């Protein structure tokens, strides 16, 4: 039974109270202290899925065999009278049934936290931060110091598309406004998605392709062997519609955001539609942002050239049949945002981006002795953005397109989960998958778009095909193990740039030629999960992962105005190899909940973007000339070691004024060095935080302080130390059931969140523009979410 359904059944019929008037009675009640732990459901970590089975109540299906009925997943909800207590909002979600750490951001937390990008949403999570190239507009998640080509981003099981892995200034085309849950997966489960997810996977899910019939709270529904969001199953489905509105206002950037989501269904069909938009102005900052240039004027205490605008929408539907469903959706994402920093402000640089994406997915539970579930995903993306700005900062007539990026990408993935079988020493469950994809990238020269070998990496295309297998061994109810493997083949087709002798390791020059490298990375992992006394679960995993170089790492050859870099690829790059060990201890139940993880990874041939300190303009001949504006960056390889750990916990101290108060804390650290002892560039600092909270069935109040220590472990060339900061945050939210006859909506979640309440100067050590771009200053975000 879903978390949302349990909440609806427990709290149904509650009346709307005005926010201010509700505070006094809510605090005055004297209730027994209790901690109701949410059932955390995750979809991204493993292709092996275990589902609870409840017998169907549909007498028309009595002729089905017992085996067929056992295939039904999460079939029918029980009446409200037998529904367990609703988990209170604000309870730390801990995942204990996976072989490595999984960070979950559930729907209500997304609504409270907000953020225009996944990197903003995850910025303060242990072991995770955001690239923050343009806060609120382009911020990609960074996991344990690994970014772009080592962190996968998927939406509803397929690649998010876009160009965020090709430049830190590019946005991630997944908006939290249209997202219901975010999962960050580390460890062996990343083999499910490919070697370019060696650092982890960020998975966003929503209901754009419905995998369940909608719940209107009145009519009975058929389950078709699949999830059903209704009180009972039985008679034929009658049409119904549910709706949700999501809106917020933020003071720091005068931002306004709003979204509307609709779900409907009848008979064997379910449909979804959503539309959203947000608009912000230049955001407020605590002080002057530019460390290297103190001569510029800053208007109204705001970060110049940081305004954003984005919008999008989607429509999708699914057809449910006996034991399965198939669905599709088409989604449009659009964004127009400015790039802060000295160069961005001087040239009024902004990015006008558009993505059209088509996704298909389905699931089938066959009535077969050997196969339990068959799943498939398919997606096609057509992405394009123009980087717009002034060619001459003194001449507004030179405003125009300075660079164009396109990405046309197709992907298909199929998984088959077999029925468990008894191998005497253990119950064994196997799932295997097949994945294939094609990508065509362009970034033509703005001065001569038709010239061959003259763009940032034109022409460029790649193909990939992979197979993987996961095996889980259940030795007992307390001891489980997993062995997984993956092999893939990657073919890349592009052209190498003109290289002066100084840029290649062997000291020989190279001219532009067609280059078609291919790689066959192989990966494997093994893990053990053990239940321990006191409700704790321990895990240890080891993995060996190979990664093929990506097109930008091989073929880049020119100026990238938005990042103010002159990027040089290296056609001699070889496969990168990571050997990792991770150990974890987690506890999800009781008044004290926590997770602790330590990891160590050794990279052979670690590929990184090395800033040389040499400045260039439009071509190699300009490198080293006075007044050049672009920092020369060369893709290079060296062996490296990453080690660190994360910890977070939440402790319910006791009852207070009818609710529960408690304390929570977090800690994360990553240390990354090359084997000669020098520092890997742009690594997050050590962070330590904690706070207090109070919650009951309706209210959540929380105050947290996160301290980031100074980052002085910087690269030898072209990286500066980053000072530490204190990030103080406070929030209060109120959730209640409403009487739809009186108020229209049936559920409400409203609240206020204060960010950076100390108005500190916050610079993100992983950002290329940290010495020119401050994170937003003090601000308040008011949000309201209504369900109809």
Image (tube, rainbow, N blue to C red):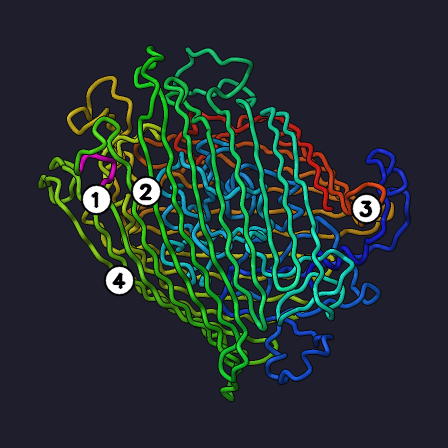
Is there CB contact under 8 Å for labels 1 and 3? no
Residue 572, given in percent of the width and then of the height, sits at 18, 49
Sequence-wise, the earlier of marks 1 and 4 is 4
Towards the viewer: 173 or 61: 61
Numbered mark located on residue 678 in the image: 2
Foreground mark, 1 or 3, reads 3
- Mark 3 — residue? 740
Residue 428, given in percent of the width and then of the height, sits at 50, 80
Q: What is the C-alpha distance between the residues marked 4 and 3?
A: 58 Å
Mark 1 Cα-neighbour bin, 10 Å: few <14, some 14–19, many ≥20: many
- Mark 4 — residue? 520
Q: What is the C-alpha distance between the residues marked 2 and 4?
A: 30 Å
Foreground mark, 1 or 4, reads 4
User: Does dot 4 land on a helix, a strand or a loop?
Assistant: loop
User: Does dot 3 land on a helix, a strand or a loop?
Assistant: helix
Residue at far bottom of view = 424
Residue 133, given in percent of the width and then of the height, sits at 44, 33
Magenta part of the chain: 453-458
- Mark 1 — residue? 570
Rendered view: 298 above or below 786: above
Sequence-wise, the earlier of marks 4 and 3 is 4
């Amino acid at each position: 039974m879903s978390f949302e359904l349990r909440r609806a059944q427990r709290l149904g019929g509650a009346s709307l109270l005005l926010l201010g008037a509700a505070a006094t009675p809510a605090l005055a009640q004297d209730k027994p202290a209790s901690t109701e732990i949410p059932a955390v459901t995750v979809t991204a970590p493993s292709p092996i899925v275990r589902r609870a089975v409840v017998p169907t109540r549909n007498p028309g299906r009595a002729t089905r065999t017992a085996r067929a009925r056992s295939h039904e997943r999460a079939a029918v909800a029980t009446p409200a009278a037998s529904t367990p207590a609703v988990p209170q909002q604000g309870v730390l979600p801990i995942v204990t049934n996976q072989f490595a750490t999984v960070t979950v951001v559930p729907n209500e937390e997304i609504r409270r936290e907000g953020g225009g990008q996944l990197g903003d949403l995850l910025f303060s999570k242990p072991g995770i931060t955001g690239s923050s190239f343009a806060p609120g507009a382009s911020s990609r998640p960074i996991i344990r110091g690994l970014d772009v080509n080592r962190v996968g981003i998927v939406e509803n099981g397929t690649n998010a598309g876009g160009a965020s892995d090709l430049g830190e200034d590019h946005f991630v085309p997944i908006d939290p406004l249209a997202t219901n849950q975010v999962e960050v997966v580390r460890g062996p489960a990343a083999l499910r998605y490919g070697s370019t997810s060696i650092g982890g996977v960020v998975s966003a899910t929503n209901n754009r392709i419905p995998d369940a019939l909608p719940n209107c709270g009145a009519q009975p529904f058929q389950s078709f062997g699949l999830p059903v969001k209704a009180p009972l199953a039985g008679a034929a489905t009658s049409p119904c519609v549910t709706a949700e509105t999501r809106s917020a206002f933020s003071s720091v950037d005068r931002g306004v955001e709003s979204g509307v989501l609709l779900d409907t269904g009848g008979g064997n069909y379910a449909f979804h539609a959503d539309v959203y938009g947000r608009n912000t102005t230049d955001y407020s900052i605590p002080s002057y942002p530019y460390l290297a240039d103190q001569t510029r004027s800053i208007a109204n205490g705001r970060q110049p050239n940081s305004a954003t605008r984005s919008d999008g929408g989607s429509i999708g539907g699914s057809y449910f049949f006996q034991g399965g469903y198939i669905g599709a959706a088409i989604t449009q994402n659009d964004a127009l945002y400015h790039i802060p920093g000295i160069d961005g402000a001087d040239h009024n640089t902004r990015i006008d981006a558009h993505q059209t994406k088509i996704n298909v997915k389905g699931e089938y539970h066959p009535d077969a002795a050997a196969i339990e579930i068959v799943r498939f995903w398919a997606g096609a993306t057509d992405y394009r953005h123009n980087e717009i700005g002034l060619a001459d900062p003194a001449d507004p007539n030179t405003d125009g397109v300075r660079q164009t990026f396109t990405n046309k990408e197709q992907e298909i993935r199929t998984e088959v989960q077999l029925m468990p079988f008894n191998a005497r020493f253990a119950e064994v469950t196997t799932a295997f998958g097949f994945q294939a994809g094609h990508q065509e990238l362009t970034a033509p020269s703005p001065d001569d778009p038709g010239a061959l070998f003259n763009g940032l990496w034109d022409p460029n295309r790649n193909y990939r095909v992979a197979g993987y297998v996961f095996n889980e061994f259940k030795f007992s109810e307390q001891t489980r193990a997993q062995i997984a493997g993956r092999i893939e083949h990657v073919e890349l087709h592009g052209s190498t740039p003109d290289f002066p002798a100084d840029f290649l390791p062997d000291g020989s020059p190279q001219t532009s030629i067609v280059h078609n490298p291919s790689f066959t990375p192989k990966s494997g992992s093994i893990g053990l999960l053990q239940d321990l006394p006191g409700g704790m679960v321990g895990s240890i995993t080891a993995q060996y992962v190979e990664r093929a170089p990506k097109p930008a790492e091989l073929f880049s050859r020119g100026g990238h105005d938005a990042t103010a870099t002159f990027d040089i690829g290296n056609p001699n790059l070889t496969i990168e190899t990571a050997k990792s060990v991770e150990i974890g201890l987690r506890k999800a139940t009781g008044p004290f909940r926590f997770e602790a993880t330590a990891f160590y990874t050794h990279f052979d041939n670690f590929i990184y973007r090395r800033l040389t300190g040499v400045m260039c303009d439009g071509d190699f001949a300009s490198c080293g000339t006075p007044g050049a504006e672009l920092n020369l960056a060369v893709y290079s390889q060296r062996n490296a070691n990453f080690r660190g750990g994360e910890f977070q916990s939440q402790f319910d101290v006791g009852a207070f004024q009818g609710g529960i108060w408690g304390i929570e804390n977090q800690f994360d650290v990553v240390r990354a060095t090359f084997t000669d002892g020098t520092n890997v560039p742009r690594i997050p600092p050590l962070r330590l935080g904690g706070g207090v909270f109070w919650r009951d069935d309706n209210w959540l109040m929380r105050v947290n302080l996160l301290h980031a220590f100074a980052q002085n472990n910087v690269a030898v060339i072209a990286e500066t130390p980053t000072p530490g900061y204190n990030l103080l945050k406070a929030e209060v939210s109120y959730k209640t059931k409403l009487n739809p006859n009186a108020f229209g909506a049936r559920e409400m979640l409203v609240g206020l969140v204060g960010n950076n309440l100390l108005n500190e100067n916050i610079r993100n050590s992983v950002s290329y523009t940290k010495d020119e771009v401050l994170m937003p200053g003090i601000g308040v975000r008011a949000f309201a979410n209504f369900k109809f």
